[in-house]
Structures are given as structure tokens and as C-alpha cells.
Amino acid sequence: MGLIVKGGEVVTAAERFFADVRIDGGTITDLGAKLDPRTGDETLDASGHLVLPGFVDPHVHMELPFMGTVSADDFETGTASGIAGGTTTIIDFCIQTPGQPLTSAITQWHAKSAKAVGDYSYHMAITDFGPNTPNEMREVVQKHGITSFKVFMAYKGALMVDDGQLYQVMKTAAEIGAVVTVHAENGDAVFHLQRELLAAGNTGPEYHPVSRPSTVEGEATERALMMARLHGATAYIVHMTCKESMHALERAKLSGQHCYGETCPQYLLLDDSVFTKPDFGGSAYVMSPPIRPRGVGHHEALWAGIQNGLLDSVGTDHCPFTHAQKLAGQGDFTKIPNGAAGVEDRLQLLYTYGVQAGHISLERMVELGATAPARIFGLTGKGSVAVGKDADLVLYSPEGKSTRSAKTHHSRADRSIFEGFEVQGRVAKTIVNGRVAYDGQQLMVTRGSGRFITRKPSHFAAGVKA
Ligand SMILES: [Zn+2]
């Protein structure tokens, strides 16, 4: 028994066309102007709707142990929140505790993610490079189907790698055809800026952005890309926020280097005035890198990158903490858990503030939010509406306005950094693995129905070397 999605306008990264979509057993099996139902087929009326591929969020952190607490969404609530917002696949970060074998961290993450309701993969974060790490990295790619790594150039004393470790990760990744995702901020500079601010009595959340100026992001982005270039590794810079890092990415791309850049809606849509909200309200927005000031070219550089292709994808860095959790940093902004919710907001925000505002086409929106993340990270069944792809679809109604709010989102986060943002249109239905998992009102998901998607390395050392 199949399902036919009838009468909608299909949008891919390349084109838009009216077509029916036939689904059999979790796979798209036909696209055509008028598909006739076979006996037993169900039909779903999609007239007046855009039929988009299920969005792929390449950057989330579900139940992440971080800064003395654990991020508020687990794999069940986090993937459910994604599905309500049109995101059907996530890539989380499996994070090695320093000294821990990489495969042991993967076992831990598999135990947590077994309750996911949408499909998922991980980037493998390396926080400690030892003599056996090259062999372990090879095993992660070849035996575990995880083909991307992560390094943090920030969070000194916790997750941060030094330049020697960065060098070795890039070298090994180039050899095994893996992508290296990079959190690019100069962690040593941030460490000293934080100490100086605290010593001067500057302890509130409004000093968080002061401790992490755009120069420290620009410097680290440049260094990460140079280190990748040295070995011909493929680097993917996550959550880019500023003109300095965009310039570094532009330089690398113009020199023929094989690299990618990602930003997130909060860096496009918010500015640093959020940090001064009363009653410790600014803490909700504390994340790293920080949200940037307006009027100095950061937002313009990011929007230009979204429009002209310098940026490759839009993720969310979904990593929510409740207000109670954020209170750990009262009197010391460096102790505010870093992160906010976003996995459910991305599609509506991109549609409203990207497409409706005239910055990008629908096709480009699909590319940034689904097709490119799937392609870059080797999720070959995801990211497009085409025969043979997984039957993950979003039926988006362009009609009507609503506002984003923590009161109505499905995340456990008790605040939304997009509270009150007006959005155009809505996710009317989300189809996951061939079944309606969200009908615009209600989630219809089964705990544990999400699947771990293994990937194959899709990259080789094609870039310029040294
Ligand atoms: Zn992150």
C-alpha cells in the first residue's frame, strides 16, 4: 500500500514543478503530472502547498553534557521539535571526553539517540588527539559510517584542541576522505578576555559578546582554513557570524580550496541588543560565537553569502537550556550554559525572512536547508524530492501568518530566541519515512522510530595543497 501526495508544487534545489509524488515503503518511487492510485493506495491532497524535501539540520546538540549541565532536549523531544518545523534529519555531534576512545563515545551516543523519532547521524568531535587517534578516525569512517569530524578551537580547558591537534586532525581527515567541521574562535584570546572582564567587575550576560569579538572568530577561521589547505583537507566552518570569517572563507574558496561555510538564523536575524534584556533575560541568547552588533557589516556579509553562494548551508546549532539552567551563570557570564533552541524555527524563518523578503528563491532555500547539508555530509537518501530518495517530505502552506513562541514550540526550551517573530506560512504536514508524522497540529511519532543513517566518505583530497 502506497501513498500519493497529489497536486502540490514540488521544490528542489534546481527547479519548481507541479507533480504528484508516489511513495512506497519509505521511498519516493514516482513523480508525475497525474499519478493514478493503485488499489490500496492512500492519497494526500497537497494542492496549494509547496512540497519540499524534509529539511536536514547539519548542526544540533541533543542531551549534550556541557558546562555542568545537559542540554534540555533529548533525542526524542529534539527530533520531534524538528519534525514539527519541517526538519526530518539531524546531524548531532558525538563528543569524545578527553582520553576516551572514539568508539566508546559513539556507543554512548547510540544509547541516547535510540529514542529519536527522526533520522540522524553524528559528526565525531575530537577533543584529544593521541597516538592511536588516526587509526580510530579510520575506524569511525569505515566501520561506523560517520564521515565527518568536529574540532573546537574554543572552550579552553574543556573541548578545545590546540594547533598541533588541529594539524593532526586535518592531516588524517585528508587521508581518509572525511570532512572536518570546525568551531572557529580563538579560545586562548577568549580565555584572557573573559578573565580581564571578570576582574574588572563586568559579570553580566552583556559582556559575553565583548569576550568573543568578531576578530577572534575571523582569526580562527583563517587559521582553520590554512591548516586544512596545508593537507588538502575539506573543512566546513560551522555557525559563521561575521564579516571577518566570511572574508577568510572567500579567500580560501577563491584560491581553489575545497571548503564550506554554514550560518544559522539567529546570526542573520538578531543583533547584540538582546544581551541587555532585563532580569537576566539576555542569558537566553548566550551562545558562541555570539550574536553580532548591527551596522558594522556582519549581517550584510552573511546575507550576501546566503544569496551569492559563498555560504553553503544554514544549520541551527540547536542546543537549548532552560532559564533555570542559565541561572548557573548569574554573577559570572562565563558560566552561563551556551546555547538556544532553533531546530523547529529554521524553515519558517528562512521562508519568511529569506524568500518572502526577496533575498533568496525557494530553490535556494531548499538548497541551504536540505540539499547542500545532505550532499556535503554524504546523506545520499536525503535532501531532495526525487525517485529513489527517502520519503521525507514537508507540505508547506504559504498562507497565513503566525508568531514563533516558546508557548507553542515543541522543544523543552522554556524560552525562544525568536519569541514574537512573525512568520508567513506554516508546516502543514511533515512526512517521515513515508508516513505523516505531523499534521500541522499534532505529532504522530513513535519513540525510537528514527534511524541512524550510515554514510560513506564522499570527499577526496581534491583541494589545493599547501
Ligand atoms: Zn554547536
Image: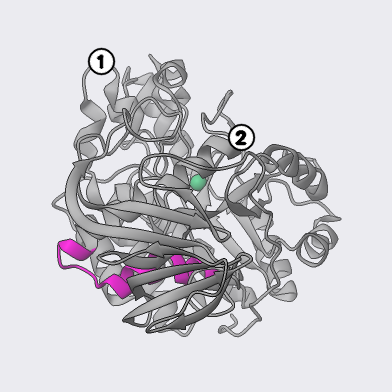
Query: Picture coordinates of residue 165 (x, y %)?
Result: 68, 55
Q: Please state which of the two labelled residues, at mark 1 or mark 2, is closer to the viewer.
A: 1
Principal secondary structure, stretch drawn in magenta: helix
* Residue 373 among magenta residues: yes
Q: Which of 94 and 443 is in front in this view?
A: 443
Which mark, by number, is residue 157?
A: 2
Q: Nearer the viewer, residue 158 or 37?
A: 37
Residue type marked 2 = Gly
Query: Picture coordinates of residue 335 (x, y %)?
Result: 47, 23
Q: Is residue 354 above or below residue 336?
A: below
The residue wearing badge 1 is 279
Q: In this view, does 186 lie above or below 170?
A: above
Residue type marked 1 = Asp
Q: Which of 51 and 313 is in front in this view?
A: 51
Instruction: Give the Cα distance between marks 1 and 2.
Output: 30 Å
* Residue 245 among magenta residues: no
Dot placed on the residue nearer the N-terminal end, 1 or 2: 2
| Residue range highlighted in magenta | 355-374
Q: Are marks 1 and 2 in contact (CB under 8 Å)?
A: no
Q: Residue at x 43, y 16 (%)?
A: 324
Q: Is label 2 in a helix, a strand or a loop?
A: loop
10 Å crowding of disc 1: few (<14), some (14-19), many (20+): few
Query: Picture coordinates of residue 454 (x, y %)?
Result: 71, 63
10 Å crowding of disc 2: few (<14), some (14-19), many (20+): few
Task: Specify the quadrant that holds the N terminus.
Answer: bottom right
- Specify whether 87 is left or right of 144: left
Q: Quadrant of residue 132?
A: bottom right
Q: How many tags in the picture?
A: 2
Query: Picture coordinates of residue 331 (x, y %)?
Result: 38, 14
Task: Specify the quadrant that holds the C terminus.
Answer: bottom right
